[in-house]
Image (tube, rainbow, N blue to C red):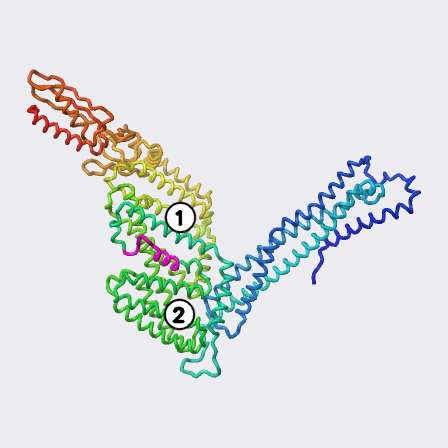
């Protein structure tokens, strides 16, 4: 039964009253014609005398209010989409209700988790629709209230009750009559539509709550019922007929519910595709840049990446797909597992020897067989016997493989551990099947097989990411002309630890989800992390502390490896990247400071408490940390002031060397003898600094010689100048200066000044030119004393 809105009733009565008054004006005038002639109608007006303009202003207010109706109704753009969404939601709910209420249906853990996720999405969508509808209803209610308030306007009452006013504003009344019809129709239809949609949305929300309750009960039943006897013992004979669902019927049902799932959840998969596409173009670009420079031989030792990384990108896509859709339909997860197994088989065909490749093919068969059994919709009893055969085969397979594992394979600890889990779960699945625990049989068998597949694919993915980072380093160095060789083992070791931890976390999440314990573990962990704890006046949560430390660790990791990403490994032989190194140093400092500020803001730690800590730190600085803070501030000044940069050749007091590193506390100089001189930043700023390469990399070289007389001065100067200008490391834009001064009657001194392009080659250039001068003078029989 539909309850009419009181505002709608009131507005209809108002409009009807206005029309009755208008229609009765003529009759009223005829009966009271004599009275009207002598009666003063000013008693109905305001205290001031009203003009025609005043009446028009009030009529304009009526027109403005009436015109608001189509404008307001026209702004309800979401009504049609809401109607379409509700139709789709009702169909999805009907399908879910049919699936959840089938008594003969075998419970599938993955599908129940997907149903739960889908119901939550439906609940969110319907709440959003109801919120929009309530907002529209509020706007209509305000509009109707505004129309009803026109009844209180005394001037409008006078307009609609006096015949003279009707004659005076005849055209306006006719136009208002047309607009009233439109307004009445729009208000009636829109109100009815909104009320109907609100009723449908409310009904959907009620159905969703019922189905969520039913889903929770069935998920709980899987855990409880699975440990009880669901079927007869395997050796007992079955009574009655057992029928399968049928392949086509099963597939149609799975496709239909999967379609609704993908309609309502799509954002995470877009991020997955974006991640894989970024990886593909990253690797492809680096290989192409190396190919253009004919340096592909630098990556000959790569075992997983190739210049066309199509296959490895698809392996990454299907490896990460389950983590982006933890509660996806069983058909989707099984399809992903099948495609991943096929892609890995194609990948291993050229990577593994026949001794390892054939056992892998056997594992793929053991993985795919249960999926096809379920898709065929076979009767449960036949599925039990076939699953028994598969679980026994998996047990024998797992034991035989574990016995053959060599020392090289044992370094892949995650695969080794998962192999034990796979074998143990196969044994448990066999026992559960024999004793009638069919749900447990399916859970343990599928979890064991999928966990091993995921462990293998995640291990490969971790190695691929390490190789991709190494490829980035090598390609960056080749593009910049740096030496190809560098000590990359410390970098790779750190990356292996990071990718190993990430792969383990992803594997654990998928593993616990397959066992239906992830949600419970997650909720328990969140409860522990989010619980508010108090020590004195200081309150905190473990979650805030973990988040704070996590962001700090990520910031430190990024600042540590950002230089390696761009090919800068801190090589002593690189002299021409001072500007880039300074930029990287600033980037590292920004990452550290920004990471700390973000960590403080994200963790929810009270700022006032941090202020107290900083105040205590200030007291500590005043008591004995002046030097540390001075060096820290001096390091920041050096970074941004650029008085010295990494790669500059400087002299500080009696110390000379090339700047190898500028840290937040101290800087490091590399002397010509190979010693590393560590100088506090405060000492650098407090002393005079001679920077040989601040604005350029040039250096003036002087050579002093003494030669015996006689000689031709012009010829000697010409020969020396010729030797200097032919040297590639001499800066020819600045003319060399050669001065000959007589010392005595038998000899003269020669002073030679010229500029070297690169200060790092100054000594070598000087020695080469001296040797060439000696050779030339010896040929000319000029004696050098």
Q: What percent of the width, then of the height, locates residue 635?
A: 33, 36
Instruction: From the image, tell me which residue sits under label 2.
Output: 444
Instruction: From the image, tell me which residue sits under label 1.
Output: 551
**Residue occupying the point 13% across, 29% down:** 770
Q: Is residue 684 found inside the magenta-colored segment of the image?
A: no
Label 1: how many Cα within 10 Å (few below 14, some 14–19, many 20+): many
Q: Earlier in the sequence, mark 1 or mark 2?
A: 2
Left or right relative to 83: residue 148: right
Choose between 585 and 747: the one closer to the eye. Answer: 747
Establish if 482 lies above or below 505: above
Establish if 776 lies above or below 741: below
Q: Is residue 624 in view from this perspective?
A: no
Span highlighted in magenta in the image: 303-319
**Residue occupying the point 67% across, 50% down:** 140
Q: What percent of the width, then of the height, locates residue 518?
A: 43, 62
The single residue placed furthest to the top in the displayed view is 745
Mark 2 secondary-structure assignment: helix
Discs 1/2, front: 2
Left or right relative to 673: residue 639: right
**Residue occupying the point 85% across, 46% down:** 25
Mark 1 secondary-structure assignment: helix
């Amino acid at each position: 039964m539909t309850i009419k809105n009181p505002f709608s009733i009131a507005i209809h009565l108002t409009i009807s009253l206005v029309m009755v008054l208008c229609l009765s004006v003529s009759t009223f005038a005829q009966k009271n014609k004599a009275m009207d002639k002598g009666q003063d109608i000013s008693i109905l007006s305001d205290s001031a005398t009203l003009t025609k303009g005043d009446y028009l202003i009030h009529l304009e207010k009526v027109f403005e209010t009436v015109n608001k109706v189509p404008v307001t109704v026209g702004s309800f753009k979401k009504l049609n989409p809401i109607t379409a969404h509700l139709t789709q939601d009702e169909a999805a709910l009907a399908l879910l209700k049919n699936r959840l209420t089938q008594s003969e249906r075998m419970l599938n853990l993955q599908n129940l988790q997907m149903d739960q996720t889908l119901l939550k999405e439906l609940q969110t969508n319907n709440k959003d629709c109801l919120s929009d509808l309530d907002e529209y209803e509020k706007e209509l209610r305000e509009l109707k209230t505004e129309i009803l308030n026109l009844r209180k306007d005394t001037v409008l009452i006078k307009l609609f009750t006096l015949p003279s006013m009707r004659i005076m504003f005849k055209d306006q009344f006719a136009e208002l009559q047309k607009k009233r019809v439109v307004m009445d129709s729009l208000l009636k239809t829109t109100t009815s539509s909104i009320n109907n949609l609100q009723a449908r949305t409310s009904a959907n929300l009620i159905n969703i709550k019922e189905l969520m309750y039913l889903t929770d009960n069935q998920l709980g039943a899987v855990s409880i019922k699975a440990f009880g006897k669901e079927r007869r013992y395997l050796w007992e004979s079955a009574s009655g007929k057992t029928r399968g669902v049928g392949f086509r019927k099963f597939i149609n049902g799975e496709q239909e519910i999967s379609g609704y799932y993908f309609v309502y959840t799509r954002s995470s998969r877009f991020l997955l595709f974006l991640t894989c596409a970024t990886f593909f173009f990253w690797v492809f670009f680096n290989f192409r840049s190396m190919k253009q420079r004919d340096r592909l031989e630098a990556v000959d030792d790569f075992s997983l990446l190739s210049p066309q990384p199509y296959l490895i990108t698809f392996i990454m896509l299907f490896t990460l797909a389950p983590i982006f859709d933890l509660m996806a339909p069983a058909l989707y997860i099984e399809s992903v597992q099948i495609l991943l197994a096929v892609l890995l088989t194609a990948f291993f065909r050229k990577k593994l020897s026949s001794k390892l490749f054939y056992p892998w093919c056997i594992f793929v068969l053991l993985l795919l067989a249960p999926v096809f059994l379920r898709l065929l919709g076979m009767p449960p009893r036949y599925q039990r016997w076939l699953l028994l055969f598969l679980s026994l085969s998996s047990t024998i397979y797992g034991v035989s493989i574990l016995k053959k594992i060599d020392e090289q394979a044992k370094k892949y600890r995650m695969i080794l551990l998962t192999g034990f889990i796979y074998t143990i779960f196969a044994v448990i699945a066999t026992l559960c099947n024999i004793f009638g625990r069919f749900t447990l049989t399916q859970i343990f068998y599928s979890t064991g097989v999928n966990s091993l597949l995921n462990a293998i694919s995640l291990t490969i993915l971790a190695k691929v990411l390490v190789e991709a980072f190494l490829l980035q380093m090598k390609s960056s160095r080749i593009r910049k002309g740096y030496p190809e060789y560098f000590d990359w083992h410390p970098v790779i070791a750190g990356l292996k630890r990071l990718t190993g931890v990430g792969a383990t976390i992803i594997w654990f999440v998928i593993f616990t989800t397959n066992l239906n314990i992830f949600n419970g573990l997650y909720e328990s962990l969140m409860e522990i992390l989010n619980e508010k704890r108090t020590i004195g006046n200081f309150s905190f949560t473990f979650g805030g502390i973990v988040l704070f430390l996590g962001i700090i660790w990520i910031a430190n990791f990024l600042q540590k490896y950002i230089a390696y990403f761009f090919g800068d490994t801190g090589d002593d032989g690189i002299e021409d990247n001072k500007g880039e190194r300074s930029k990287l140093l600033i980037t590292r400092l920004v990452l550290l400071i920004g990471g700390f500020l973000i960590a403080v803001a994200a963790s929810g730690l009270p700022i006032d408490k941090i202020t107290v800590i900083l105040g205590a730190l200030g007291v500590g600085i005043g008591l004995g940390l002046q030097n540390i803070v001075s060096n820290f501030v001096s390091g920041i000044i050096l970074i941004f002031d650029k008085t010295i940069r990494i790669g500059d050749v400087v002299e500080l007091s009696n110390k000379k060397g090339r700047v190898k590193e500028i840290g937040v506390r101290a800087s490091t100089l590399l002397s010509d003898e190979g010693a590393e001189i560590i100088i506090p930043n405060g000492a650098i700023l407090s002393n005079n600094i001679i920077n040989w390469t601040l604005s350029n990399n040039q250096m003036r070289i002087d050579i002093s010689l003494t030669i015996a007389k006689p000689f031709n001065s012009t010829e000697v100067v010409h020969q020396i100048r010729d030797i200097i200008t032919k040297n590639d490391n001499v800066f020819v834009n600045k003319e060399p200066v050669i001065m000959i001064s007589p010392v005595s009657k038998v000899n003269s001194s020669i002073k030679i000044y010229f500029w070297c392009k690169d200060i790092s080659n100054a000594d070598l250039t000087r020695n080469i030119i001296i040797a060439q001068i000696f050779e030339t003078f010896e040929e000319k029989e000029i004696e050098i004393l």
